[in-house]
Image (tube, rainbow, N blue to C red):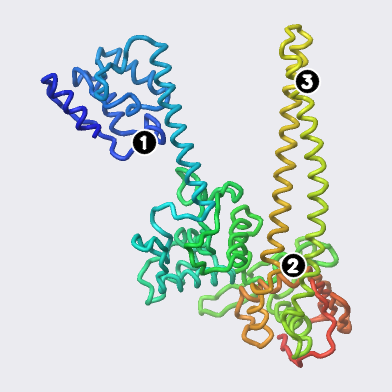
């Protein structure tokens, strides 16, 4: 339409069109002047006097920003090139500065209003769970006749597999590699494709917007900025609790609260193992080496940086695994897993209570700061009309004071939101038995062995508080089980284990371990 209008104007005045500068599909609102290739070509050709005049449909096709309008007008004015608007047969540069500035400002105002109206409409539709168009996520297609979202069974199974693998501790790259190796899967997966699925609430039945940052490849915004709505059109394939668990893990890894290999590390007791003598964490280290003939020497160990204490991973892993199986999990053969889990919940209930008390204190401080802000604002308003030097000094002080209060308010709000997220994580993830039931059953009935690194690592993190180690002079320490503590010895090393549940046992399996 714009091109046709310009061509008709040229034809009307018998002019020859020497070149067309078409920025197809590019918005003057979203793209800055220097990012628009064809507009840049137009301005360079103007500076080289390659044409006598320019036709454009309307002034907002050139720019939306008043500053950009001034820059464009100066170039055309310096080279005496008129710009004609074909929609109303007027000149882009009328020579009168104030009317031009008003007109340029109105184009930006109109653009901003349109964007806000569109955004508000989308927000409303999303919050109501309505479909807003576009391509559905992997696993679904949109049927325009029935106006419904239809599942693609083979793809949905892959989605479920991805969430299942992520729950077990695999990272995006590992999942992409594992799924791509499956001969039945026709798609070549990347870690970004896996990330897109894990971070999309669509799979738990929610429409959403504002999830990704503009002009940033697959970069996720803060969760507080998302607009979400439960949709009756989506048949959710992932439980809400399961999705929340996976997304929480993603957030923790992204913010470095959980290292990338937190769950997949072969050092099952990393961050849980302590040197009792020094009261500090023991660090993992791989001392294995291979000779020229292929023979392997050395061991993987944990060691204390403050003293010479070290222990082989194989010894302590086997022993703690034995404790988990015999004392923490089985206890007796008839003990239901959900009863076991009720003990775990007690430790998290204490954490939740603590967070709740901290939120109350923070809310009190926030309320006081809001009152102080209101007082400072009233005082500032009262002094604004006073022109004396004392009032000007007081205004400066009040403005600085308001800025400090505003920072406090922001910090309190961020802290409150953080604590609420931690409570939500406890409610939806840590104390949701369905997420852990299968892992417990696998371990209880012997389906999991020491070779299953991610399962054992997750259970160790979930069930254990700390494991202290120290040398035993004679190795004569007797095994002692009481409450949530266990004390025993392995190869002259005393193991003092504290769990999140009651570890006292009356019936135990007889498992013999060989420590070489």
CA gap, disc 3 and disc 1: 45 Å
Q: What residue is shown at x 55% (from left), y 72% (from top)?
A: 164
Q: What residue is shown at x 62% (from left), y 59% (from top)?
A: 248
Residue 27: give its label. Answer: 1
Residue 279: give its label. Answer: none
Assign a secondary structure to mark 2.
loop
Assign a secondary structure to mark 3.
helix
Left or right for 440, reference 71: right
Q: Which residue is mark 3?
A: 379
Q: Which residue is mark 2?
A: 272
- Kindly check if marks 3 and 2 are in contact, taking CB atoms under 8 A apart as contact: no
Residue 409's place in the image compared with 424, above or below, is above
| Location of residue 498 in the rendering, given as x and y in whole percent from the top left corner | 82, 72
* Front position in the image: 142 or 337: 142
Q: Earlier in the sequence, mark 3 or mark 1?
A: 1
Q: Quadrant of the N terminus?
A: top left
Foreground disc of the pair 1, 2: 1
| Location of residue 144 in the rendering, given as x and y in whole percent from the top left corner | 35, 60
Q: Quadrant of residue 145?
A: bottom left
Q: Quadrant of the C terminus?
A: bottom right
* Front position in the image: 9 or 32: 9
Q: Quadrant of residue 80?
A: top left
Residue 24's place in the image compared with 245, above or below, is above
Q: Earlier in the sequence, mark 1 or mark 2?
A: 1
């Amino acid at each position: 339409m714009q091109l046709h209008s310009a061509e008709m104007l040229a034809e009307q005045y018998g002019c020859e069109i020497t070149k067309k500068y078409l920025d197809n599909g590019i918005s003057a609102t979203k793209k800055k002047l220097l990012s628009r290739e064809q507009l840049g070509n137009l301005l360079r050709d103007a500076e080289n006097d390659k044409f006598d005049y320019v036709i454009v449909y309307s002034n907002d096709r050139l720019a939306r920003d008043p500053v950009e309008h001034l820059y464009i007008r100066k170039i055309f004015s310096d080279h005496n090139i008129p710009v004609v608007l074909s929609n109303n047969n007027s000149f882009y540069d009328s020579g009168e500065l104030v009317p031009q500035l008003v007109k340029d400002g109105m184009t930006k105002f109109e653009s901003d209003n349109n964007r806000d109206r569109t955004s508000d409409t989308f927000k409303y539709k999303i919050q109501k769970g309505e479909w807003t168009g576009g391509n559905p996520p992997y696993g679904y297609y949109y049927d325009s006749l029935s106006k419904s979202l239809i599942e693609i069974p083979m793809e949905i199974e892959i989605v479920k597999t991805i969430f299942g693998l992520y729950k077990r501790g695999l990272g995006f790259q590992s999942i992409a590699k594992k799924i791509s190796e499956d001969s039945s899967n026709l798609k070549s997966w990347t870690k970004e494709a896996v990330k897109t699925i894990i971070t999309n609430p669509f799979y738990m039945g929610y429409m959403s917007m504002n999830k990704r940052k503009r002009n940033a490849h697959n970069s996720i915004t803060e969760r507080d900025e998302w607009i979400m709505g439960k949709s009756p059109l989506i048949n959710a394939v992932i439980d809400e609790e399961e999705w929340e668990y996976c997304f929480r893990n993603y957030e923790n890894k992204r913010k470095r609260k959980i290292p990338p290999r937190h769950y997949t590390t072969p050092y099952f007791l990393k961050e849980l193992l302590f040197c009792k003598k020094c009261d500090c964490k023991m660090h993992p280290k791989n001392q294995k080496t291979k000779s020229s003939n292929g023979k392997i020497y050395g061991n993987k160990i944990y060691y204390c940086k403050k003293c010479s204490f070290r222990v082989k991973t194989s010894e302590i892993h086997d022993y703690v695994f034995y404790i988990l199986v015999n004392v923490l999990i089985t206890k007796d053969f008839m003990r239901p897993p959900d009863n076991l889990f009720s003990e775990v919940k007690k430790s998290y209930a204490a954490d939740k209570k603590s967070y709740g008390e901290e939120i109350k204190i923070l809310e009190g401080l926030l309320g006081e700061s809001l009152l102080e802000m209101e007082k400072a604002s009233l005082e500032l308003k009262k002094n604004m009309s006073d022109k004396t030097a004392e009032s000007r000094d007081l205004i400066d002080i009040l403005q600085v004071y308001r800025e400090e209060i505003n920072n406090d308010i922001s910090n309190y709000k961020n802290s409150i939101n953080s604590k609420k997220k931690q409570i939500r994580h406890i409610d939806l993830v840590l104390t949701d038995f369905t997420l852990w039931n299968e892992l417990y059953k696998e371990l209880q009935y012997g389906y999991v062995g020491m070779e299953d690194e991610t399962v054992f690592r997750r259970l160790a993190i979930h069930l254990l508080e700390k494991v202290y180690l120290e040398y035993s002079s004679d190795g004569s320490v007797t095994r002692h089980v009481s409450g949530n503590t266990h004390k025993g010895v392995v190869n002259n090393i005393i193991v003092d284990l504290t769990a999140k549940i009651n570890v006292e046992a009356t019936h135990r399996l007889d498992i013999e371990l060989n420590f070489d």
